[in-house]
Each structure stands twice: as C-alpha cells, then as structure tokens.
Amino acid sequence: MAVSSGSTIISEDMTEENVQKVVGFLKKVGVSASLTGQFTSKDFYSSIIRDLLSAHRVERGRVTCFFSVKPLVSNFYGSMHGGAVGAIAERMSIACARTMVAEDKELFLGEMSISYLSTAPENAEVIVDGSVVRSGRNLTVVATEFRVKKSGKLVYTTRATFYHMPSAKL
C-alpha cells in the first residue's frame, strides 16, 4: 500500500529519512524547477549542441567531430550530461547515415543504445567518431565512439538503427 503526499505517491515501506534524502537530491538537481521563456523555445537543446559541436572530418560512411563539455551540458557531478551524449549521438548518426543514404530517402530512427563507460569531465574536449556499420536498401546502422581528446580514453559508445522511408510521390 502506498500513501500520497500531494501529487507524490510514497510507498509505506519507505522511512521518512529515506524519503527526505530522495526529495532533497531531486531538489538539488533541479527536478520540478520552472524553466524561463528562453529555455522553452522549440528545439532549444539542439541549438546548444550545435554551438558546441564542430566538424573535423567527413568521408563516405564516417564523420568525426569535436565537442567541448561546457558547464551548460554538464550534470550535477561535473561531467557530461547523458542527455547531451544522446543528442550528439543522434546528430552524428544522422550525419553518418546521410553519407551513404540518398537524400530522397527519409530516415527514421528506430533504435539507439548508449553505453556510459566512464565520464567526460567538464571543460574537456571530446572526439566523437561515427561510422556506418551496415547500410542496405531498408536500414542503416551507425556506431559512434566518444573519446576524451587529451587522454584518448573511451567514455561512451552508441549504436543507432535507421529505417529508410520512401519519400511520398504526390
């Protein structure tokens, strides 16, 4: 059985001390904080990522970029936020797929997996290297690696599967 505290449901087997610890942590990391107008605009997060990501090398089936881990994409612990990893991986994967898939084919992201192996610390430069693993008539698979530039340490890996959608003929 659970009890309700306002709109929050709390399990009866939780001690008050543990509930307060969890609530305190959530408040520290900004859960339920209000966003101001500039942060609610359409595709705001993509604008942040776009400004911090720069192309280094583009070739058929492979794209390499540099990314700066600035405080605005850092988490509570001073390392790259997982959402930023996902957003960059998606952009990189689309860019890689586009080097192989014709522009008249629409890409649909069907699946993405992310492995968080370590952390990229705040203010680090990260090398993001994406490559097409497989590309056929109906789908393309892209793998991406994130490495800290200074040490070469592998911190994140991703794999994305895109389905090719035929464009509508009107």
Image (tube, helix red, strand yellow):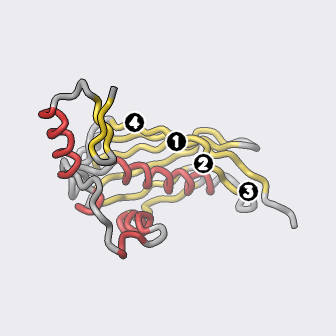
Residue 150 visible: no
**Disc 1: CA contacts within 10 A as few (<14), some (14-19) or many (>=20):** some
User: SS for tag 3?
Assistant: strand
Name the quarter where the N terminus is drawn: top left
Amino acid, disc 3: Lys
Q: What residue sits 44% from the left and 54% below the top? A: 87
How far is the residue under mark 3 from the one under mark 4?
29 Å
Q: Are marks 3 and 4 in contact (CB under 8 Å)?
A: no
Q: Which mark is residue 112?
A: 1
Is residue 7 among the parts visible in the rendering? yes
**Residue bearing the label numbered 4:** 115
Marks 2 and 3: CB-CB under 8 Å?
Answer: no
The C terminus - image quarter: bottom right
- Amino acid at dot 2: Leu
On the image, the x and y values in percent for residue 30 come to 24, 55
The amino acid on which the numbered mark 4 sits, given as a three-letter code, is Ser
- Residue that numbered label 3 is attached to: 105
Front-most of residues 9 and 92: 9
In whole angstroms, how far apart are the C-alphas of marks 2 and 3? 13 Å
Query: Dot 4: within a 10 Å radius of its alpha carbon, few (fewer than 14), some, or many (20 or more) residues?
Result: few
Query: As displayed, is residue 125 above or below residue 146?
Result: below
Q: CA distance from mark 3 to mark 1?
A: 19 Å
- Residue drawn 35% across the image and 65% down it: 52
> Quick one: SS at disc 2?
strand
According to the image, label 2 marks what residue?
A: 109
Where does the image place residue 131, in percent across and percent down from the top left?
53, 46
Q: Residue at x 78, y 54 (%)?
A: 166
Q: Using the rendered view, name the quadrant where residue 64 is placed.
A: bottom left
